[in-house]
Image (cartoon, grey):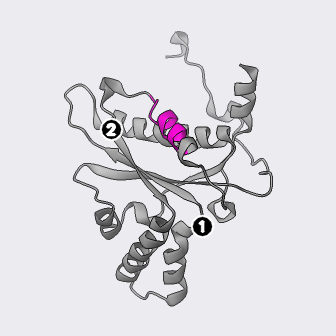
Amino acid sequence: MQDMIDFLLERRSSLVKDIRAPGPDAAQLETILKVASRVPDHGKLAPWRFIVFQGRARLDFGKVLATAYEKTVAEPDDEHKAAEQRRFARAPVIIAVVSRHIVHIKIPHWEQILSAGAVCQNMLLAANAIGFAAQWTTDWLSYNDEVLGALGLEDGEQIAGYIYMGTVEEKLEERRRPDLRDIVTYWRADEA
């Protein structure tokens, strides 16, 4: 059990710019997706789904991103357009986590969004536990109507994040974390 606690205390996201091949193989990816789906899910609604990009699909989707960028920006430039076209080529596997709003009398939309966030975190943990680097991002492509249309999102769906996975060459440096004294309080009845 201490190994798991130590892993969680040392877990950290990589930067997409540092992630390279190799990425998860088919069996590893299936494990990551299974772990991702084992989150709190009030009512067993599965208010999320996954879109996996790997191989040629990453490059094909880059064309969608470049076109959407060009249509969205008032004065698009070739350098940024090319960067958007290469965006998904940076990592060997990218997973779009789609948050789905399922109308339910007892389960508010907010709880469903939280469940999708838990999916993203579990996906990071699973990728890291298997030995891969990963980062959860959103960025403009999570909110752009043309991109969302190309992904086939329906009414009530939104992007919770894109999870990039692969390998990094160097060990990640620790970053500053919040001091618990700054973020934790203990409620007491006599102080209410």
User: Which mark sits nearer the N-terminus, 2 or 1?
Assistant: 2
Residue 50 vs 35, above or below: the answer is below
Assess whether residue 174 is covered by the magenta stretch: no
Q: Main secondary structure of the magenta part?
A: helix
Residue located at (28% from left, 32% from top) = 108
Answer left or right for 20 relative to 39. Answer: right
Where residue 162 sits: x, y (%)?
48, 55
Answer left or right for 30 relative to 176. Answer: left
Q: Range of the magenta residues?
A: 29-39
In terms of depth relative to the viewer, which is nearer, 178 or 161?
161
Q: Quadrant of residue 64?
A: bottom left
Residue of label 2: 47
- The answer for how far apart the CA atoms under marks 2 and 1 are is 28 Å
Tag 1: Cα neighbours inside 10 Å, few (<14), some, or many (≥20)?
Answer: some
Assess whether residue 35 is covered by the magenta stretch: yes
Where residue 169 sits: x, y (%)?
78, 58
Residue located at (67% from left, 35% from top) = 182
Residue of label 1: 90
Residue located at (36% from left, 44% from top) = 49
Secondary structure category for the residue under label 2: loop
Where residue 93 sits: x, y (%)?
54, 56
Residue 36 vs 58, above or below: the answer is above
Q: Quadrant of residue 101?
A: top left
